[in-house]
């Protein structure tokens, strides 16, 4: 790197491309890749379980030394959300981000555990590499260990009747998912809301749930305990005129995708008004447009109008005079949900409005929140209940956003239970049980892969160890005793008593997870670890390893803005050094 100046005296840096590249091969490449991946898993390890800690991510626009005054702040303990927002630079570490996303997209829960498990497997891989095992042998051993563990999971999984005791089993499963979130104080109430929402849109015969029909809205103010379930749609809007009626019972709803405005020519035009009579004629013609529009709506029998576009002020005034409450600027996705919930047909032109295309709802009302006069429209009791809304309240935007993510995880868990109702106990019990099964099977393997299979069994124990550590126990002593009890009592339900309820039997505590989620975690983690272990040659810029001016952001930092800030800082240092000379 060298410093040069242009004709105006402005400095710039000349970089030779090859100087910024570095090549790693063999054991050095394995070590660099494993360190990068395990750094991410160690980041999330303290967020695992009901006693896990949250992470705060502040988005910087320039560099660490120049924080943005309006930088976005995120507080969460959801693994997928943390890794998605962290903007990770290292390409190997990005594979764990994709791993977390895959778990989130497929299952919706377990995004932290899958990354912690993958990191533990890579740590065991490093120990095996130091012993001289070939990476392919390690990867194959991990795959065999995964097969043994998934078979054992299927053998200890239990089928639950999701309709038993008023869907109590579904509620317990949702409570397990919410136990590690910021909403755990109200986990029973929120779990019941999630179960009610999923069952409202589920097709139990086909075992299918359409999440598009569940809308989650948040409003700052109140507490999480004020969160409610609405059998209909909630719009973050208000009636277009303050003097319109605030509540309409037995509503007949007209949904429009055309604006309350006069038609506009599609070509350039000029209207010359040369006299007062011509102006009055134009005004009367415009008034007639609005009058005809409102007349067509009234003649159809509608008493509420929901429009995707805006209103002219004159049209808004005429709607108020005609006692026709209206809402404008309703979003496209909300329009579709409203049509599903009310049984209405979306009308693209005023000439096509008929009574058959109107929807119906028990109530359409406007609610005010707090002292800031925030308002929302609630469309409740529609002809079809196949579209519902969960209205979340919270003390701040950060709390509301985290509650949205938490409820999404719980909804996914309930959906998975409807698709496949087999469950396994939680609290790290199945990981310990699978570890015993894998170790027993490893003794029968006569090749060097035996060590890799044992390494996989050791990696499984990291989940209960992390749960015990995060819950304030001495992890090694606690898990050692728990392993001995599982073997002596032959009870695979014994797990970490994170909530200190006095029993280690997870089924007695009502802590269980879907079998589908655990199997997916094992399979995804094994696949990603195998891919990382097969990389033995890396050619990349030095930033792949560690930026010179911001070393602590080597894995997690803002890519382009930070690079520009680093160059600016380097220019400043070089100029200062040159002046001293």
Image (spheres, rainbow, N blue to C red):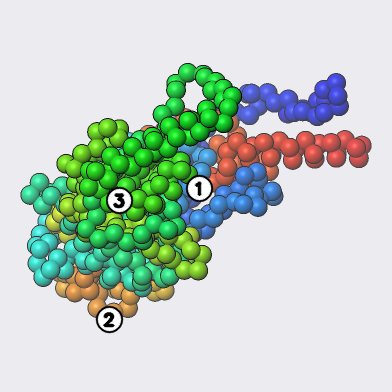
255 or 473: nearer the eye? 255
Query: How far apart in space, not on screen, are marks 3 and 2 (Cα)?
Result: 57 Å
Left or right position of 224 against 90: left
Sooner in the amino-acid sequence: mark 3 or mark 2: 3
Q: Measuring 28% from the left and 79% from the top, which residue is drawn there?
A: 501
Residue 104 appears in view: no
For the N terminus, the quadrant is top right
Q: Measuring 42% from the left and 51% from the top, which residue is drawn there?
A: 240
Sooner in the amino-acid sequence: mark 3 or mark 1: 1
Residue 332 in picture, x, y percent from top left: 35, 40
Disc 2, SS: loop
The residue to which callout 3 is attached is 304
**Outermost left residue:** 205
CB within 8 Å, label 3 to label 1: no
Residue 366 appears in view: yes
Q: Is residue 257 above or below residue 107?
A: above
The residue to which callout 2 is attached is 502
152 or 389: nearer the eye? 389
Q: Which mark is residue 86?
A: 1
Query: How far apart in space, not on screen, are marks 3 and 1 (Cα)?
Result: 45 Å
Sooner in the amino-acid sequence: mark 1 or mark 2: 1
């Amino acid at each position: 790197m060298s410093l040069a100046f242009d004709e105006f005296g402005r400095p710039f840096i000349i970089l030779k491309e090859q100087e910024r590249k570095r090549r790693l091969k063999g054991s050095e490449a394995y070590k660099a890749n494993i360190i990068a991946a395990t750094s991410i898993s160690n980041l999330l390890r303290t967020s695992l379980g009901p006693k896990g800690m949250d992470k705060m991510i502040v988005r910087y626009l320039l560099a660490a030394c120049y924080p943005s005054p309006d930088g976005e702040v995120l507080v969460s303990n959801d693994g997928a959300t943390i890794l998605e927002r962290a903007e990770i630079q290292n390409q190997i570490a990005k594979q764990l981000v994709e791993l977390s996303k895959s778990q989130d997209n497929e299952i919706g829960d377990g995004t932290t555990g899958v990354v912690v498990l993958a990191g533990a497997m890579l740590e065991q891989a490093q120990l095996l590499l130091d012993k001289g095992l070939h990476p392919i042998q390690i990867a194959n051993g991990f795959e065999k260990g995964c097969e043994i563990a998934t078979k054992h999971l299927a053998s200890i999984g239990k089928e639950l009747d999701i309709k038993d005791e008023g869907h109590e089993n579904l509620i317990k499963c949702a409570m397990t998912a919410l136990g590690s979130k910021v909403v755990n104080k109200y986990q029973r109430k929120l779990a019941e809301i999630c179960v009610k929402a999923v069952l409202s849109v589920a097709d139990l015969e086909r075992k299918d749930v359409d999440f598009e029909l569940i809308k989650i809205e948040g409003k700052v103010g109140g507490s999480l305990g004020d969160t409610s379930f609405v059998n209909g749609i909630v719009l973050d809007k208000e009636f277009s005129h303050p003097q319109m009626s605030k509540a309409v019972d037995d509503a007949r709803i007209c949904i429009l995708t055309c604006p309350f405005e006069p038609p506009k020519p599609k070509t350039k035009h000029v209207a010359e008004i040369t006299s007062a009579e011509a102006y009055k004629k134009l005004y009367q013609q415009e008034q007639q447009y609005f009058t005809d529009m409102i007349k067509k709506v009234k003649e159809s029998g509608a008493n509420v109008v929901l429009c995707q576009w805006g209103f002219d002020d004159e049209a808004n005034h005429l709607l108020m005079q005609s006692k026709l409450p209206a809402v404008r600027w309703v979003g496209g996705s909300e329009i579709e949900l409203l049509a599903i919930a009310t049984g209405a047909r979306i009308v693209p032109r005023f000439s096509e409005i008929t009574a058959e295309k109107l929807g119906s709802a028990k109530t359409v009302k406007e609610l005010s929140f707090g002292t800031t006069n925030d308002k929302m429209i609630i469309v409740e009791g529609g002809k079809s209940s196949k579209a519902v809304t969960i209205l979340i309240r919270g003390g701040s935007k950060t709390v509301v956003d985290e509650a949205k993510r938490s409820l999404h995880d719980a909804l996914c868990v309930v959906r998975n239970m409807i698709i496949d109702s087999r469950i396994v106990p939680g609290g790290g019990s199945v990981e310990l049980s699978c570890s015993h099964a894998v170790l027993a099977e490893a003794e029968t393997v006569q090749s060097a892969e035996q060590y890799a299979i044992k390494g996989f069994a050791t990696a499984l124990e990291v989940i209960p160890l992390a749960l015990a550590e995060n819950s304030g126990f001495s992890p090694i002593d606690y898990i050692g005793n728990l392993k001995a009890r599982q073997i002596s009592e032959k009870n695979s339900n014994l797990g970490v008593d994170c909530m200190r309820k006095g029993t280690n039997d997870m089924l007695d505590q009502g802590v269980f997870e879907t079998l589908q989620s655990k199997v997916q975690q094992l399979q995804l983690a094994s696949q990603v670890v195998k891919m990382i272990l097969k990389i033995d040659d890396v050619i990349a810029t030095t930033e792949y390893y560690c930026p010179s001016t911001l070393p602590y952001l080597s894995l997690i930092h803002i890519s382009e803005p930070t690079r520009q800030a680093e160059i600016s800082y380097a220019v400043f240092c070089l100029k200062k050094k040159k002046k001293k000379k």
